[in-house]
C-alpha cells in the first residue's frame, strides 16, 4: 500500500484520471495475488496417485494481462495528441512492484520503488529540457507571380526549420493559397516559435495563418 501511495501521488498531483486510488488498488491487488500464490505453493506438488499439478504462475501472469486493459483505457488520442502513456506504464510498473512484495522479494521491490520514484519525479524535469522535433502548419495567401518559395525556404532554414509543401489551391483569378508543414527542434513547452509571419510576408505573402501541432 505504501508503494502504491508513493507512486500514485505523482499521478494524482498531475491531474491524471488514474490517480492515487487507482494506482494503490492495482499495486495492492498484485501483491495479494502473489501472496495467494505463496499460500497455494504447498498444494502445488504432484503426488504419486494424482494427475493434477497446479500452475500457480498463471495467477500473477493473469494479473499482468488484466492490468494491460486498464492501461489501455488510460491512453487517450485526440487531434493527433496521445496522452496517458506514462500513466499506463505506471500502472504496469506498480503491478510488478506489488508482485515483488507479495512474492517476498522485499529488497527487489524496494529497489524498483526507489527507481520508479526517481523516474517519475526527478526525470520529468530532465525530459522537459530535452529538445524534440516540433511541428506547425503554415497557411499563406499570395498574389500570383508575387511570391517566392525559395525566399520562404531560405528564411525558414536560417531559423533552423525544414519546410515541406502540403498542398495548394486557387483563391480566385489572382490569388493562391498554399499550405506548408514546418519542423524544427526545440524545448517541448517553449513559447518561442520561428518567425512564420515575418518570413512569409518577406517572401511576398499577403495573408498568413499558422498553428503549432502539439
Image: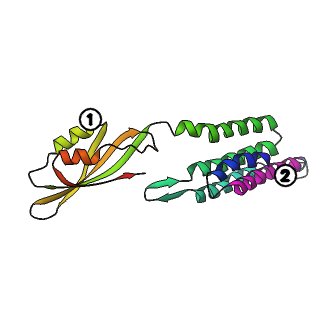
Q: What is the magenta segment's predominant secondary structure?
A: helix
Q: Callout 2 environment at 10 Å: few (<14), some (14 to 19), or many (20+)?
A: some
Q: Is residue 95 visible?
A: yes
Of the pair 167 and 205, the residue shown nearer to us: 205
Q: Is residue 87 left or right of residue 27?
A: left
Q: Which residue is mark 2?
A: 36
Nearer to us: label 1 or label 2: 1
Residue at 37% over, 47% down: 135
Query: How far across and down, in percent of the image, does residue 186 sit?
Result: 41, 38
Q: Is residue 39 left or right of residue 16?
A: right
Residue at 56% over, 38% down: 125
Magenta stretch bounds: 15-41
Q: CA distance from mark 1 to mark 2?
A: 64 Å
Q: Are marks 1 and 2 in contact (CB under 8 Å)?
A: no
Query: How far across and down, in percent of the image, does residue 44 sit?
Result: 86, 48
Query: How far across and down, in percent of the image, does residue 137 sit?
Result: 32, 52
Q: Callout 1 environment at 10 Å: few (<14), some (14 to 19), or many (20+)?
A: few
Where disc 2 sits, the SS reads helix
Per the image, is 22 magenta?
yes
Per the image, is 172 magenta?
no
Q: Is residue 118 left or right of residue 211?
A: right
Q: Is residue 214 left or right of residue 144?
A: right
Where disc 1 sits, the SS reads helix
Which circle marks residue 158 in the picture? 1
Does 110 sit above or below residue 58? Answer: above
Does 122 sit above or below residue 200? Answer: above
Of the image marks 1 and 2, the number of the one nearer the N terminus: 2
Amino acid at each position: 500500500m505504501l508503494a502504491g501511495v508513493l507512486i500514485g501521488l505523482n499521478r494524482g498531483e498531475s491531474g491524471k484520471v488514474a490517480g492515487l486510488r487507482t494506482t494503490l488498488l492495482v499495486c495492492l491487488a498484485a501483491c495479494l495475488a502473489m501472496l495467494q500464490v505463496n499460500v497455494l505453493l504447498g498444494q502445488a506438488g504432484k503426488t504419486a496417485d494424482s494427475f493434477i499439478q497446479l500452475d500457480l504462475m498463471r495467477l500473477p501472469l493473469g494479473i499482468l494481462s488484466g492490468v494491460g486493459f486498464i492501461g489501455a483505457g488510460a491512453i487517450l488520442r485526440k487531434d493527433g495528441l496521445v496522452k496517458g502513456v506514462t500513466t499506463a506504464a505506471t500502472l504496469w510498473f506498480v503491478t510488478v512492484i506489488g508482485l515483488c512484495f507479495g512474492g517476498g522479494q522485499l529488497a527487489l521491490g524496494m529497489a524498483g520503488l526507489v527507481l520508479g520514484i526517481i523516474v517519475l519525479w526527478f526525470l520529468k524535469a530532465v525530459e522537459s529540457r530535452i529538445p524534440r522535433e516540433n511541428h506547425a502548419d503554415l497557411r499563406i495567401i499570395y498574389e500570383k507571380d508575387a511570391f517566392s518559395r525559395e525566399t520562404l525556404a531560405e528564411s525558414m532554414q536560417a531559423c533552423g526549420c525544414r519546410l515541406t509543401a502540403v498542398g495548394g489551391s486557387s483563391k480566385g483569378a489572382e490569388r493562391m493559397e498554399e499550405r506548408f508543414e514546418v519542423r524544427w527542434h526545440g524545448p517541448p513547452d517553449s513559447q518561442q516559435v520561428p518567425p512564420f509571419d515575418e518570413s512569409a510576408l518577406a517572401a511576398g505573402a499577403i495573408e498568413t495563418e499558422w498553428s503549432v501541432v502539439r
